[in-house]
Amino acid sequence: MTIFSKIIAGQIPAFKIAENDRFFAFLDIFPLVEGHTLVVPKIEVDKFFDLSPGYLQELLVFAQPIARALEAAFPCNRVGLSVIGLEVPHAHLHLVPIRSADDLNFTRPKLTMSPEQLQEAQAKILAHLTH
C-alpha cells in the first residue's frame, strides 16, 4: 500500500482539498510554492499514463475546479501541471500556482510549512472551490 493509499484511507492525516469516489486531492506538505496540491486516483497505478484513457479524462475534469480555486487563492499567472511520479509509486498530478516556469523546478528546495500555514492554505483554496 502506497503512502497515497494510506492518506486516501485516512491512515495518514492530510490537508484534503477535494474527494469523490475515484480521486483525492490534498496539499503537498513539502510544496514548491504555497498551495501546491496533489491529485491522485484512488486506484494504485504506478505510472500516470498507465491509467486508462477514461480515468485520465476524469482526473483532469476533477482537477479543473481545484486549479481555478488555486488561481483565485494565490497570486500567480496560472496553475502549472506536472507529472513526475518518481517520489511515490502511485500516479499523481501536481497542481502548482506559478508565476514563472521556474516555479515548477522540482530540483529546488521545497518550502517548509507549519501545520498552521498548511491549514491556512487549505482554507484559502476551499473558500474558492466550487464544483
Image: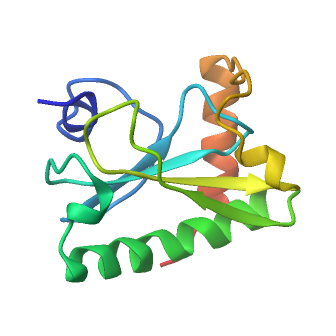
Which residue is depicted at the point 26% across and 52% down?
47
Q: Quadrant of residue 16?
A: top left
Q: Is residue 82 above or below residue 36?
A: below
Q: Is residue 40 visible?
A: yes
Q: Is residue 76 left or right of residue 50?
A: right
Q: Is residue 20 left or right of residue 92?
A: left
Q: Nearer the viewer, residue 105 or 39?
A: 105
Which residue is depicted at the point 19% across and 30% down?
2
Q: Give coordinates of residue 79: x percent, y percent.
A: 70, 64
Q: Give coordinates of residue 92: x percent, y percent.
A: 37, 51
Q: Nearer the viewer, residue 47 or 78?
A: 47
Q: Nearer the viewer, residue 21 or 44?
A: 44
For the N terminus, the image quarter is top left
Q: Nearer the viewer, residue 110 or 75?
A: 110
Q: Is residue 32 above or below residue 13?
A: below
Which residue is depicted at the point 59% across and 25% down?
30
Q: Give coordinates of residue 107: x percent, y percent.
A: 67, 29
The coloring applied to the image is rainbow
Q: Give coordinates of residue 23: x percent, y percent.
A: 28, 60
Q: Is residue 108 above or below residue 25?
A: above
